[in-house]
Amino acid sequence: MDMIYQEEQAGKPAKKGKAIFGGSFDPIHLGHLAIAEAALDQLPVDEVIFMPTKLRYYKKSGRVSSDEARYDMLTLAVKDRPGMSVSRLELDTAEERNYTVDTLARLSVEHPDWEIFFILGGDSLAYIHTWRQARILLREAIFAAAVRDDVDREKLKALMEGLKERFPGSRFALLEIEPNPLSSTAIRRAAAEGEPLTGMVTEEVEMYIQRNHIYRQVPEEQD
């Protein structure tokens, strides 16, 4: 676990560490699962909770599979993986759009004994100050940013220090992951052409995609 987090937590009462991993997961792939495994290994958490979003953010196009299909694929992907689960919290809300600040605030109220970590990509950290109610958001959880190499690490450390100055009370951790070329866009395109998805998604997810003809009509798009 990164020293940035360790130093800030010294002497504080213990809580149950839970990592929230949000995203569209369209579909969940092996790269996502590797990040979850890294979180279980490196962060003081006993569970990584995948939380599929109802709507995509920072995407030019809409999702190409249903909420239920994405939830089903997530469930299949984690069913035999200890410490991983899937939450319907955002999928089942009445709101058309869910904001991270509202989700984390709700979790904090419903689970006051949790120490919540929020997993995000290192690139997302660069614009987290633009997220809805950023000043409140950054006090609701410890933000664990994925780092892939030494250059990335130093860049993120500097970014974290800047955010801590700008947003007092904000907390961060670094999550070391192996570089991974997998892309949900590439997987959707491969599935649309009937290509095998071996090495990209779990066997159960691949079978689900093939059986239900998911992504067979996929538009051109960029992740």
Image: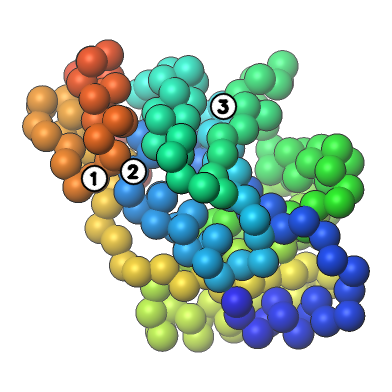
- Is residue 33 rendered to the left or right of residue 186? right
Return the residue at label 2: 29
Measured Cα–Cα span from mark 2 to mark 1 = 6 Å
Report the residue at 36% width, 34% height from top.
Answer: 27
Q: Quadrant of residue 93?
A: top right
Return the residue at label 1: 200
| Label 2 Cα crowd, 10 Å radius (few <14 / some 14-19 / many 20+) | many
Measured Cα–Cα span from mark 2 to mark 3 = 18 Å
What amino acid is at disc 3?
A: Lys
What amino acid is at disc 2?
A: His
Choose between 119 and 60: the one closer to the eye: 119
Measured Cα–Cα span from mark 3 to mark 1 = 23 Å
Compared to 131, does 213 lie above or below? above
Report the residue at 54% width, 29% height from top.
Answer: 55
Q: Secondary structure at mark 3?
A: loop
- Is residue 14 rendered to the left or right of residue 205? right
The answer to whether the residue labelled 2 contacts the one labelled 1, judged by CB atoms less than 8 Å apart, is yes
Q: How many marks?
A: 3
Q: Going from the N terminus, do you reach mark 2 or mark 3 first?
A: 2
x, y (%) of residue 84?
54, 45
